[in-house]
Image: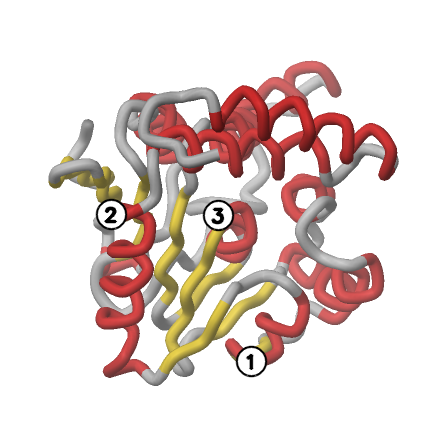
């Protein structure tokens, strides 16, 4: 991994840090590709912690909105975005939970990463924004990342208004899971980490698998899936049934 994406494995935890603090951890396409690989490579861990170095989580994609020197065809332009869609997909495909820790600004791509994490802890000082429309950028990449995370009215408001919202508002919209005072964020992460460490591996994997599929099923199918997954997971060693 590059110095711009730091990966550290501690016991059963993989810690991934966006490491461009001087630029607010703005993401290049190369960093997005590296982040996707880091998420995929962490599958043997129990869970992943994703955070930004310095004062911000991530202030968006570097160079977003800059026109290419030569006109591109629709297919070429679509291909340029694949690295971002692939990064988003890595969060959904990961068999283990991704825990986001957000301090400071989460703007554009950073806001979508916060939403994509399975659990997101935010400081009261954190702010969130989807600024694309205000810069003349079609925001559907961001919208697609949040389509199964954020209610319709909230998503429409974020994209059309481009307004900066605080952590409490982000909590009400489903972008984050919980909000803490800045000086309590680390202890909250430690407490959550301890709960995840305590959970048996089959439960860690089974919960993520169920959330990935069942929440878009009709209720009958979701119940049937729960019945089958419950039986499969509880037959594993270490589970109490």
Local packing at callout 2 (Cα closer than 10 Å; few below 14, some 14-19, many 20+) is many
The residue to which callout 3 is attached is 117
The percent position of residue 39, horizontal first and vertical second, equals 36, 30
Q: Nearer the viewer, residue 179 or 165?
A: 179
The CA span between labels 1 and 3 is: 17 Å
The residue to which callout 1 is attached is 168
Residue at disc 1, secondary structure: helix
The residue to which callout 2 is attached is 17
Q: Tell me whether circle 2 and circle 1 mark residues in contact (CB < 8 Å).
A: no
Query: In what quadrant of the picture does the N terminus appear?
Result: top left
Q: Nearer the viewer, residue 33 or 214?
A: 214
The CA span between labels 3 and 2 is: 14 Å
Residue at disc 3, secondary structure: loop
Q: Residue at x 52, y 35 (%)?
A: 208
Q: Residue at x 67, y 68 (%)?
A: 173
State the image quarter where residue 25 is shown.
Answer: bottom left
Q: Confirm whether residue 152 shows in the render.
A: yes
């Amino acid at each position: 991994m590059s110095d711009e994406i730091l990966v550290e494995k501690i016991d059963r935890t993989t810690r991934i840090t966006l490491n461009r603090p001087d630029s607010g951890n703005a993401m290049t396409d190369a960093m997005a590709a590296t982040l996707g690989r880091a998420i995929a490579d962490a599958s043997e861990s129990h869970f992943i912690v994703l955070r930004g170095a310095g004062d911000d989580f991530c202030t968006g994609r570097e160079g977003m909105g800059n026109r290419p020197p030569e006109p591109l065809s629709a297919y070429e332009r679509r291909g340029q975005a694949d690295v971002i869609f692939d990064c988003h997909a890595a969060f959904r495909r990961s068999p283990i939970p991704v825990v986001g820790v957000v301090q400071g600004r989460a703007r554009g791509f950073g806001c979508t990463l916060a939403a994509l994490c399975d659990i997101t802890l935010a400081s009261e000082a954190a702010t969130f924004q989807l600024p694309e429309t205000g810069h003349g950028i079609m925001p559907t990449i961001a919208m697609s990342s949040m389509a199964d995370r954020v209610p319709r009215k909230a998503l429409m408001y974020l994209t059309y208004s481009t307004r900066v919202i605080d952590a409490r508002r982000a909590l009400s919209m489903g972008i984050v899971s919980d909000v803490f005072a800045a000086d309590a964020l680390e202890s909250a992460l430690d407490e959550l980490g301890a709960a995840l460490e305590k959970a048996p591996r089959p439960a860690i994997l089974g919960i993520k698998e169920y959330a990935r599929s069942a929440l878009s099923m009709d209720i009958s199918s979701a119940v049937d899936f729960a019945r089958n997954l419950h039986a499969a997971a509880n037959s594993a060693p270490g589970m109490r049934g």
